[in-house]
Structures are given as structure tokens and as C-alpha cells.
Amino acid sequence: MDLNLLEGQAVIQAATTAAPLLGFIILIYSGIINFRPDITDIETRIQDVPSIYTLNETYDFIIIGGGSAGSVLANRLSEYPFWTVLLIEAGPDELPLSDVPILFTSLQKGPLDWKFQTQPGGKYFCGAMHGHQCNWPRGKVLGGCSVLNAMLYVRGNRDDYDNWERLGNEGWSYDDVLPYFKKSEDVRIDTEFIDEKYHGKGGYQTVEHFRYRSTLSDRFLQAANEVGHEIRDINGEQQTGFMISQGTLRNGLRCSTAKSFLRPIKNRKNLHVTLNSMVEKILIDESTKQAYGVLLNKFGITREIFVSREVILSAGSVQSPQLLMLSGIGPPQHLQSVGIKPIVSSLGVGKNLQDHVAIGGLTFIINKNISYPTILEVLNTESVDSFIRDHRGPAYWMAPCEAMGFLHTKFSDPTVDKPDIQLFFGAFGDNSDGGLFIKRMEGYRDDVYKAMFEPIFDKKTFTIIPLLMRPQSTGEILLYNKNPNSHPLIYPNYFASERDLEILVEGAKEALKIVLNTNIMQELNVELNPNPIPGCPTDDTRSDLYLRCLARKYTMTIYHPSGTVKMGPDNDEMAVLTPRLSVRGVNNLRVVDASIMPKVVTGNTNAPTIMIAEKASDMIKEDWGFGGDFNLDDEKNFDDFVGMARLEKIVKKIKSNLDYW
């Protein structure tokens, strides 16, 4: 095709794409505001404490970070009416548009995103991205990453948790954590699709199938089955296999942890939530090594807020280690290098960074004329009307991952249920949105889009994304400086282990087999996009050589950073936390989020993070003398609790008087 003609078509495409996208968003937002009170949900939204001066001087518990873990903790700890809890979130409340599944990619790189980026990967990773840096979206909003993510509900593998226990973390085996997965869950999926005894009913977090999907997802599952893969509930007894994606949804809409765990308890008087509030550091007594509060900044005004029981850090795998280091907890040499006085030496803070790296750009062209809508074709008034009036239609679509699977490559034992690759099936290609959302979200350069996707801009496509499950490569988080507003330095070290790259390439080859070597997919006359990524061998885009190069160029993260404040036994000098998630060397300080994982789980990390917070809540209650299921509706339990609370107040009063004299 003539280059000038191609460029002209690209300009027309951009113009004709932007208008319907913008119009769709405006129309659907207007429809939500006027006709969807279930989404605006004004009556149950969390009320922000408007001024830093109206906060209490002291709380029993201060939770830093209102994300996937922090929201759960705030709910469970405030169940006891005599415990005062402060939840601190750096961002605002979630927006009505964040509920709409099809718009999830538009939320990233916006005001609800911290907009982190990795350090440049050079020739090793992120080579197709601007500055060789991959985007790392993190939620800066109440609900955290559960507001920005793809809403996929995946628990991980039984052996993930059994291995945590083998590493010296007593109480974290699969049998120990399964009750907490079930406790948090309210599954709303037909029983024919799930393994019932592994799911919960009546919990705060609703789990559903996405309300809209294309016909291609069923075809993809049939193709996987054709080459020998089982179709099963991967959140059930066994993980290896394929399924239609399960999501953290309620009535087809995104169900963040803010919606699921915080809105139902908005009237609890003992829970305060302060939004748009940054913790600049955790206050630690240098002589006693006890955390006694936080330095809080809200709208440029700073104030010390004190704690009588614990500070709980739930800022995520990037910012939990950052805040520990800003507070003087971490590797001493690194802290001193940025001008911070070390208070507690903890060598593992920021280390052990793990992520599920993936290959992007495996786009397949459908050459048969079938009834299969592209994203642009559904951005119309009919879809808006269906969404607003009938609560149906493509607005409920999670196109990037309609189905998923876990499989073995030649590097893992197929007789053991420990798959080493996850596949996402996406009913779209990077060409499908005209380069407005996917290109922006991933951050790759214009020349990459121009070479790979502009030549097929008018084609119907789909994508398969292979993800590496158990990376051997680990990275680290370092401070840029001692300014809490500066982004930390993120070194993911993707493919530092050559074995990681080899496993991922084998995963890509399994994806090619499912698509190109099955009768059910070849009925559509499917072919791999023949346009190679710039800088890679061009003779065979199915070769190992090309796929290795593609992985280093179109490096994707599915946003699962973990392990940077890991738990472990006393004899592990890199273990920042005890198995009860207390920070070693500091009293009254815990960390509760995905950073505590000694090894990243096999699959998406949102559901495991919710589980971690559920389990941590019980640990905290036990450590403060309220273990087990303590039901305040029971008259005896209530009387016992009141008696203990009164005794504690008396002790506090005596201590206060002694301190005064």
C-alpha cells in the first residue's frame, strides 16, 4: 500500500475514531447522572472528613491507603464500635464512569492514576515504549487498583499458599486462606459454571460473569478444548484449564472494594475517612522503636495524627516500601544516600519485586465475514440507550479478557496442578480503537503503531496475551529522594533470568497453537498479524527468535507488582514482616497488601489482596484480645466487649494521669 495513502487513511481513522469515543463518553455520563441512580449511588457514598482540623487527635487504628486491602481493613476493624479507625486515601472517591466495564482503559493515565513508570529497560524490556519505560498504573482513588483494574477475579494456585507456609509463614497454607476467600465473596454465577464448595455466598465482594461478551469467547474455549485443555472453574479444586472470566462485579457493573466494603458501613460513627490526604511519613519513636502516628498532609496543610494501637500500611507494593523508607525503615546505606536518617535497618524493604510480565502484540486477523462487533462499532447511541434503559449491551463488555486459561509449557510438570502460563483472550486488537486507548495505556511509540496496526486498521481482530506466572527475575523499589511527593524508582528487571523469557515464548507458542492449529478457529480463516514490530526479525513472526524479540519490545505488565515488603521467618534477613504481618524491629506497625507476598501468586492479585486483608483483620483482632467470630449482636459478647472497653478506658485514664504527673 502506498505510504502517503496509508498516512491519509490513518488521519481519517483518528478523526473518525475520536469523535464517537468522546460522544459515547459524554452521552453515557449524562445518562448515568440522569437515569442511573444505582451508579451515582449518592445515598451510600463515603463522606470525606472535610478538614484536617476536624479529625480526631488520636485513633485506635490508622490505615494508610484506601485501596483493595485498606477498604477491607477499615470495614472489619470498625466492626467493634469502641475502636476508632481512620482510613487515609490520597485520591478522591471513585467516579460514576469507573463503573462501566467497557471504559476501564480510559481510566488509566488519568487523574485517578499515580502514573508510575519503570526505569528504562534498554535492550532488555519495554523497548517499544516511550523512553523504554513501561507504564505502571496504580489507583489514586478510594478503592485503589480495584477501580482501575480489569475486574478479573482469580485466587491463585493451591501450591502458592502452601509454598508460603513452606517458606516459614505459619498459618498461610491454602487450607488456612480458603475460608477468607469464601468469607469475602458473594458469588452470583450459575452453579453449572463454578465449583460451589470453593465459593462463598453472602460476603461483601460480589463475583459475576461479565454481562456482555462476543461469540468469539465460546469459540476460543472450544479451540482450547480441541487441543486438550479442560474447561473448568479455575477458582475451584484445580487451576489448570480455561473458563469464561469471572469478575468483581455487581449487577454487571464494577464492584470495587470501596463499593463492596465501605459504602455498606458509611454510617459507622467510629470510622473516619479522609480523602485527598497524603501521609508524608510514619511517626516512630527512635528510642522505643514504636509507631505512634502519622504526618498527614491534606490540601497543603500538615498535621500529626496519633494512634493508640497500630498504624497499618496498605499503600501497595510500590508505595508501602516507599513510605517505610521515607520513615527511616529500610536498607541503611540507601536511606543515607538520599538524606534520611535510618531508624530501623531492614534490608528487604523494596526488594523482591515480582510481577507477571506478558507479551503484547499477538494480534490475529479474522478474514471471514462474521457478525462480530469491534469496539468502535458499539460506541453508539444504541449502546448507550441499552445501557441506560435496559441495563444491557456492550457497555458491560470487558473486551480485553473475555476468557482466560492456565496451562503448562514444556518447562513445568503437566501432572502437577502448577501451570506456568496464563492466557488472556481479548475480543479486540490494538487496531480496534484507532490507537486512542490501548496505545496510550501501554505507552508505545507512534512508529510502532504505524508499523504494526495501521496497515490493518479496518480489519476485525482479536488478541491473546500470554503472562509469565512464576518469574525467577526480581526487581526493586528505591527512593528517588526524600520528598514524599516524588515517584519512587521502579526497577522490574524483567527477563534478568533468561528462563523467564523462554517460558513466556513457549506460552506464546501455545497461544498460536490454539488459534492457528484448530479447526474451530480456522473456520474463521484466522491469521497472525503479518506486520512485525520495528527492530525485530521480519522473516517469520511465529519463530522463537521473533517472539523473544517481541517480548523485549512490546513488554506488558498486567499490573501485579508484589513482594516488596515480604513476610518470612526470623532467620530470613530479607523478610521485613513476621508471618503476622508486623514490621520487624518496630512496635505497633503492620503492612497489609500485596507487598507482603514472599512469592507472587499464580494469577491476578486483586482477590488475593482482599483475602490477605480479611485474614490480617482477624490477626489484629486476635492480637488485641478479640479473636474468633466475635458477634456483637450476641448479648453476652456485647456485654463482654463493653466490659473490656470500659476497663481499657479506665487504664488509659490512669496512664494519662500518671503521664501528666
Image (tube, rainbow, N blue to C red):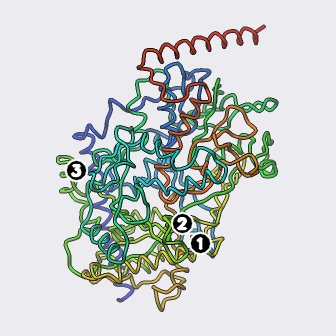
Q: Which residue is drawn at 74% across and 43% down?
A: 329
Is residue 244 toward the left or the right of residue 158 in the image? left
Are the two marked residues, 2 and 1, in contact with CB atoms closer than 8 angstroms?
yes
Numbered label attached to residue 387: 3
Q: Tag 1: residue type?
A: Asp
Mark pair 1, 3: CA separation: 42 Å
Q: Which residue is drawn at 42% across and 31% down?
A: 46
Seen as rendered, the residue at the extreme bottom is 539
**What is the crowding at mark 3: few (fewer than 14 residues within 10 Å), some, or many (at least 20)?**
many
| Nearest to the observer: residue 101 or residue 10 | 101
Q: In which quarter of the image is residue 309?
A: top right
Mark pair 2, 3: CA separation: 34 Å
Is residue 201 toward the left or the right of residue 383 in the image? right
Measured as percent of width and height from the top left, residue 617 is found at: 54, 35
Question: Disc 1 designates what residue?
Answer: 500
Q: Which of marks 1 and 3 is in front?
A: 1
Q: Which residue is drawn at 20% across and 56% down?
A: 381
Image quarter (top left, top right, bottom left or bottom right) of the C terminus = top right
Measured as percent of width and height from the top left, residue 135 is found at: 53, 61
Is residue 323 toward the left or the right of residue 96 in the image? right
Question: Disc 2 designates what residue?
Answer: 357
